[in-house]
Amino acid sequence: MALYFAKGPATLGKKYRLCNLPGAGEAVAAAHALSPPAEAYGNDPNIEMIWAMKAYQHAEVYFNLISSVDPKFLKLTKVDDQIYAGFRKSFGDLKIDVLDPEELKSEAAKAKWRPFCMQFDGVVEDFNYGTLLRLDCTKDYTEENTIFVTRIQFFAIETARNREGYNNVVYSHATEIKSVAVERGLSA
């Protein structure tokens, strides 16, 4: 899977290929490098690469999770009910199966999302960290199907997708592939 990530105005025009990122061995070093406050860093490309790696790892773990467990049973945070209720109160008409990037990134959208997100400051750990989100919930993470959002936006949208049945297609497809593999005597 070729997945790219570009972050903010400081890296405008730069892309990092995430499928060639360092492995889990470097994850501990990345966590250590990211322990000082954000103000301690400039626009260090190494730090940006570490953040990209963390965002990709989060995406990979989440996709594996919804491929392995029926999404309607998933609990992403301790406050999923609060996140979901607030999300649907603020964004009741938002189409979440296939997201329009403008609904997340336009100036009008940012003005609407900001109060929603800020209510989870101190409630959801790392609520404002950058996270990769699939635009079309029936597809995997790819360059064309991925947008960079805050963690609380990810939790809100993915909790809604799980509860409203939109992520069932990923789980059903993975289950179907495993069944075929078992029938053919292959390990899934």
Image (cartoon, grey):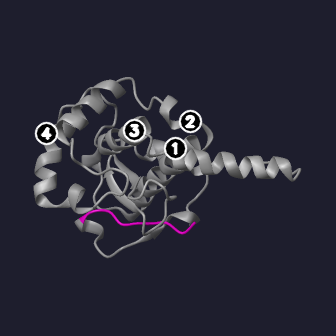
- Circle number at residue 70: 2
Q: Provide the residue designation for mark 4.
A: 115
Q: Does residue 25 appear to the left or right of 66 in the view shown?
A: right
Q: Provide the residue designation for mark 3.
A: 164
Q: Does residue 43 appear to the left or right of 65 in the view shown?
A: left
Q: CA distance from mark 4 to mark 1?
A: 30 Å
Question: Could you tell which of marks 4 and 1 lies nearer the N-terminus?
Answer: 4
Instruction: Give me the residue at 44% from left, 40% from top.
Output: 165
Give percent across and percent down for residue 99: 32, 57
Give percent across and percent down for residue 106: 16, 61
Front tag of 2 and 3: 3
Instruction: Give me the residue at 53% from left, 49% from top.
Output: 169
**Depth check: 10 or 171 in front?**
171
Please give the range of residues in magenta.
1-8
Disc 2 + disc 4, Cβ < 8 Å: no
User: Please, is residue 128 above or below residue 1 in the view?
Assistant: above
